[in-house]
Amino acid sequence: MNTTLSISRPSLRWLATGLAAGLLAASLAGPGIVAAQTDSDDGDTLRTISVNGTGRVKAEPDVADISLGVVEQGKEAGEASSKAAASMDSVVTTLLEMGIDENDIQTTSLNLSPRYDWNQEPAPIVGWEASNMVSVTIRDIESVGAVVDGVVDAGANSVNGISFRVEDPTEAQAAARSAAVADAETKANQLAADAGVTITGVVSITESGGQQPQPIYMARNEMAMDMAASSTPVMAGEVELSVNVYIQYEIA
């Protein structure tokens, strides 16, 4: 942590200029602690301490997002495409029957590509592969495992991953925000005490950050095949919401 203070006395202006370059280098190397010197509206130099504060809050997720779909092959492009369409129709029908809202099912990719025999030169086309992927939002966390089992039974053979989140993070973000401000204030008070100055107010506050979804990654076809043999346990765990603040304090 680098602590730097600006110099405002006119008689030391030449010293302030020399220190500025050194303080800038120190602030860039430090963990978010910098010093600033700006001009106030009345023309006097405003002395400040600037710090970063971080607040983190963990919460139980109430929404899951799953990427899943079908991959089918055929000797002709039309055959592969038709098989994929039929399989996906079965998957979507199952999702709707399990209570998933139609608005929570969104197509994310459609692909049709040739398959080559790379053991020959030039490599001939020996078939086609079609894939259809959707993103599904599940609002009943307890049903995630059952939904995965249901779509696999219906023909889904590609499950790329699950991520969990809090649908309304307002309350958790407010708690993280308060923690971030408290963290910044603690740092600023320490800097001020060590430097022998007093914090007299806040000049500016900047906020950044947000929710960090908790992903669970799954392989493609092999994982889907294994799921069909037994029920799928899915652990939602916790998600972390973080807020970062950059606060500039005026000192005297």
Image: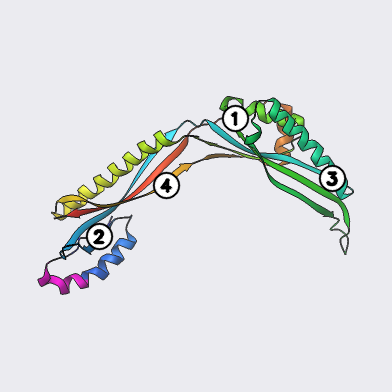
Q: Mainly helix, strand or loop, the magenta region? A: helix
Circle 2 crowding by C-alpha within 10 Å: few under 14, some 14–19, many from 20:
many
Instruction: Check the picture and name the quadrant holding the C terminus.
Output: bottom left
Name the disc covering residue 35, or none: 2
Q: Are marks 3 and 4 in contact (CB under 8 Å)?
A: no
Relative to residue 139, is residue 238 drawn left or right?
left
Which residue is disc 4 drawn over? Answer: 209
Which residue has dot 1 on it?
234
Q: Position of residue 137 (x, y in %)?
A: 60, 35
| Secondary structure of residue under mark 4 | strand
Q: Which residues are magenta?
A: 9-18
Indicate the quadrant containing the N terminus: top left, top right, bottom left or bottom right. bottom left
Residue type at numbered disc 4:
Gly
Q: CA distance from mark 3 to mark 2?
A: 64 Å
**SS assignment at label 2:** strand
The residue positioned 18% from the left and 52% from the top of the image is: 192
For the residue labelled by badge 3, is the local secondary structure a helix, a strand or a loop? Answer: helix
Question: Does label 3 or label 2 sit earlier along the sequence?
Answer: 2
Spatial separation of the CA atoms under disc 3 and disc 4: 44 Å
Q: CA distance from mark 1 to mark 3?
A: 32 Å
Disc 1, SS: loop
Q: CA distance from mark 4 to mark 1?
A: 27 Å
Residue wearing tag 3: 80
Mark 4 vs mark 1: in front: 4
Q: Residue at x 25, y 60 (%)?
A: 35
Residue type, mark 1 in image = Val
Task: Work out whether mark 4 precedes mark 1 in sequence or the reverse, and give the earlier one.
Answer: 4
- Check whether the beta carbons of the residues at disc 3 and disc 2 lie within 8 A of each other: no
- Seen from the viewer's position, the closer of residues 214 and 251 is 251
Q: Amino acid at mark 2?
A: Ala
Which comes before the other along the chain, label 3 or label 4?
A: 3
